[in-house]
Image (tube, coloured by chain):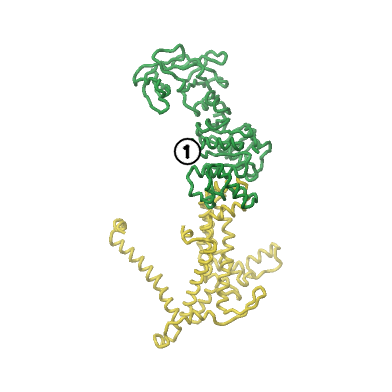
């Protein structure tokens, strides 16, 4: 602190500290506390706010268990509250997105870190970053156009005689998955790339010299070394996917529902901000729990990820 | 078990740069062979070609009589010890050592037993369950050797593995490596820029410069009978005199220099111009009276005490420095700086050599 005062002067130091404090308190902590507080209060007409009915209750959170639907995955039929189903599907498809991102990112990251001539790396980075210059909304719409029934993808495949007639690509969760993978795969590539870059190439050669085939080199040498990078990439992709609203809204089909869309419906359609807040916190808490459990299973520590 | 290696007309180009130029060498099974040379001379490239990480641009490499063309490192009967050892930090010591066996599908109990036996052999018992980071430099060295021996290679390739150790440990590990080689009978190919290491450990040494093998001989011949100026200067110290041959007979020659006529052995490859006379400081004698031949008057300009010997520098009238080494055994009288002496040497200990045999 004294170092900062010496360097910037007392006035500027004070300003910097105040601005940081303002941002943290007013723009991050306060809204969250307000939301948390309102999530425990019932949704009431304006006249009754502060009245006898306005008491703290967990009722908003319990709404997630209302309204059973019948589901039959793999031939087993059972009943599930509709929002629990949405939540489970959100988690499940987020996991799938994370796995697909890893399968795409790992070979590319390995190629960039160990095979590609380092002089070509800046070009490679540029190619990877160019799509980020376009806003997320436009990118999602671009995919919506590409995947449309009479869109470019169907047209190209029909004309190449790979398929006979146009295919409806956006059905079920297809569109959402494609959109999410496309949007968040970079968050997997870079941590994994960093992790693999830090591996001494001699170790790969030593393993090969001792007789290891390529897959064993990856299984025993590269993957264990890259584990923290993979974990941090996976956490990011999973959290961003589960919390994404834009992609499921644009690329969703009539049969896809993302939990964030349920939150949005409580907020904008039902105008019940209290329940919306409760659902939002449920998503946050459950995702954090899920990630913690998975990290425990794979024996990854939070400090590993931070590196 | 151990295999010989034949390099025939092996060349290796990196773009326009020829890293190894026409290497021909035959290494016998069970031999301890060293490649000695300055950094960038191509010795590591030769090692990487033998282990299979680099394919030669031309020529053939045979291990145990079998052509290795197109064979990947994991298909060759060689084991490489890297300069930085490249131990696997996320595995325990015994897993490191038995990695090559794990690859070959050996069951866990056998692997563990083999690792323990090898640890015993490299004098590191009880370290099986430690992690790499818990070991000292010398201990890591031993683990690397054990890991390479575990796959029972026909040829061990060592890329300056001792360079990171301190002097005392390095000397100890030299003897250890030599002993392990004798015990296992495996062919060792050792890469180093340290002439002391190469001379002390090897059965034969190949001295390399600028991609070419300059001389292959046993350590004694490398030091006593270098074929050219590069080998003479890279392995040991010399007093060097430029000049030209006037008469030659029976392997001896008269040599005219600016300091007067000398007589010395004529090197086998000493033909044409660009010849110089090389004599070791330990063969150079300083005396108060002139000798019958090969005698130069000098003024003592510097005396440096090196421990086992004392290096006396004399300056000739023309300003050239001649170094004479006196053994520090109590018998030597060290001349004062500024005194006049005669530097002389026996003709049999001096050699007339070309700068370099080929190219360069």
Query: Pointer 1: residues within 10 angstroms few (<14), some, or many (20+)?
Result: few
Task: Say whether residue A86 is left or right of residue A25.
Answer: right
Q: Quadrant of the N terminus of chain B?
A: top right
SS class of the residue under badge 1?
helix
Residue A225 on image: x %, y %? 53, 54
Q: Nearer the viewer, residue A224 or B117?
A: B117
Q: Residue furthest top?
A: B292
What color is chain A drawn in? yellow
Residue B328 on image: x %, y %? 41, 24
Residue B273 on image: x %, y %? 53, 20
Report the chain shown in green: B
Task: Say whether residue A306 is left or right of residue B220.
Answer: left
Quarter of the rendering containing residue B290: top left
Q: Nearer the viewer, residue B151 or A206?
A: B151
The reply to whether residue B166 is visible in this rendering is: yes
Q: Residue furthest left?
A: A10
Q: Residue at x 34, y 20 (%)?
A: B336
Chain bearing mark 1: B
The reply to whether residue A205 is visible in this rendering is: no
Q: Which residue is mark 1?
A: B169
């Amino acid at each position: 602190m004294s170092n900062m005062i010496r360097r910037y002067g007392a006035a500027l130091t004070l300003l910097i500290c105040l601005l940081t404090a303002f941002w943290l308190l007013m723009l991050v902590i306060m809204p969250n506390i307000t939301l948390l507080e309102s999530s425990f209060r019932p949704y009431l007409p304006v006249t009754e706010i502060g009245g006898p009915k306005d008491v703290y209750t967990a009722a908003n959170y319990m709404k997630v268990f209302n309204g059973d639907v019948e589901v039959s995955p793999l031939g087993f039929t059972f009943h599930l509250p509709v929002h629990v189903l949405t939540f489970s599907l959100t988690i499940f498809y987020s996991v799938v997105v994370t796995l697909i991102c890893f399968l795409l990112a790992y070979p590319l990251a390995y190629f960039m870190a160990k095979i590609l001539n380092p002089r070509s790396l800046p070009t490679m980075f540029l190619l990877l970053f160019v799509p980020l210059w376009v806003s997320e909304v436009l990118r999602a719409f671009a995919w919506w156009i590409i995947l449309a029934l009479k869109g470019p993808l169907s047209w190209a495949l029909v004309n190449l005689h790979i398929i006979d007639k146009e295919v409806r690509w956006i059905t079920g969760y297809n569109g959402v998955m494609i959109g999410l993978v496309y949007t968040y795969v970079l968050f997997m590539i870079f941590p994994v790339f960093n992790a693999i870059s830090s591996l001494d190439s001699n170790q790969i050669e030593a393993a090969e010299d001792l007789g290891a085939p390529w897959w064993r080199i990856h299984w025993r040498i590269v993957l264990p070394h890259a584990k923290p990078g993979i974990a941090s990439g996976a956490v990011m992709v999973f959290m961003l996917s589960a919390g994404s609203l834009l992609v499921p809204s644009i690329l969703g089909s009539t049969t896809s529902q993302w939990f964030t869309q349920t939150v949005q419906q409580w907020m904008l359609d039902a105008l019940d901000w209290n329940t919306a807040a409760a659902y939002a916190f449920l998503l946050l808490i459950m995702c954090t729990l899920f990630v913690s459990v998975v990290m425990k299973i794979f024996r990854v520590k939070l400090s590993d990820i931070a590196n | 078990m151990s295999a010989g290696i034949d390099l025939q007309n092996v060349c290796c180009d990196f773009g326009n740069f020829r890293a190894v130029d026409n290497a021909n060498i035959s290494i016998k099974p069970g031999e301890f062979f060293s490649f000695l040379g300055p950094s960038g001379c191509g010795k590591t490239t030769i090692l990487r070609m033998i282990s299979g990480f680099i394919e030669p641009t031309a020529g053939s490499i045979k291990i145990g009589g079998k052509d290795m063309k197109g064979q990947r490192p994991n298909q060759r009967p060689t084991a490489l010890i890297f300069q930085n050892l490249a131990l696997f930090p996320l595995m325990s010591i015994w897993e490191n050592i038995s990695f090559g066996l794990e690859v070959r599908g050996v069951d866990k109990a056998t692997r563990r037993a083999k690792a323990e036996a090898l640890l015993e052999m490299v004098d590191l018992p009880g370290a099986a369950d430690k992690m790499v980071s818990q070991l000292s430099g010398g201990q890591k060295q031993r683990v690397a050797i054990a890991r390479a021996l575990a796959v029972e290679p026909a040829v061990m390739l060592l890329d300056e593995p001792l360079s990171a150790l301190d002097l005392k440990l390095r000397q100890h590990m030299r003897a250890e490596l030599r002993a392990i080689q004798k015990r296992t009978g495996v062919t060792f190919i050792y890469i180093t820029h340290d002439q002391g290491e190469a001379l002390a450990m090897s059965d034969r040494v190949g001295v390399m410069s600028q991609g070419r093998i300059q001389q292959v001989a046993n350590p004694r011949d490398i030091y006593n009978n270098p074929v050219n100026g590069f080998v003479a200067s890279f392995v040991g110290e010399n007093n060097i005199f430029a000049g030209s041959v006037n008469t030659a007979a029976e392997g001896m020659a008269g040599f005219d220099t600016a300091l007067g006529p000398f007589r010395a052995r004529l090197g086998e490859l000493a033909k044409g111009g660009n010849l110089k006379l090389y004599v070791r400081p330990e063969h150079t004698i300083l005396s108060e009276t002139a000798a019958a031949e090969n005698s130069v008057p000098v003024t003592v300009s510097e005396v440096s005490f090196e421990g086992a010997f004392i290096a006396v520098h004399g300056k000739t009238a023309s300003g050239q420095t001649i170094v004479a080494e006196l053994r520090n055994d109590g018998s030597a009288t060290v001349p004062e700086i500024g005194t006049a002496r005669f530097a002389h040497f026996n003709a049999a200990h001096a050699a007339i050599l070309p700068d370099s045999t080929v190219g360069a």
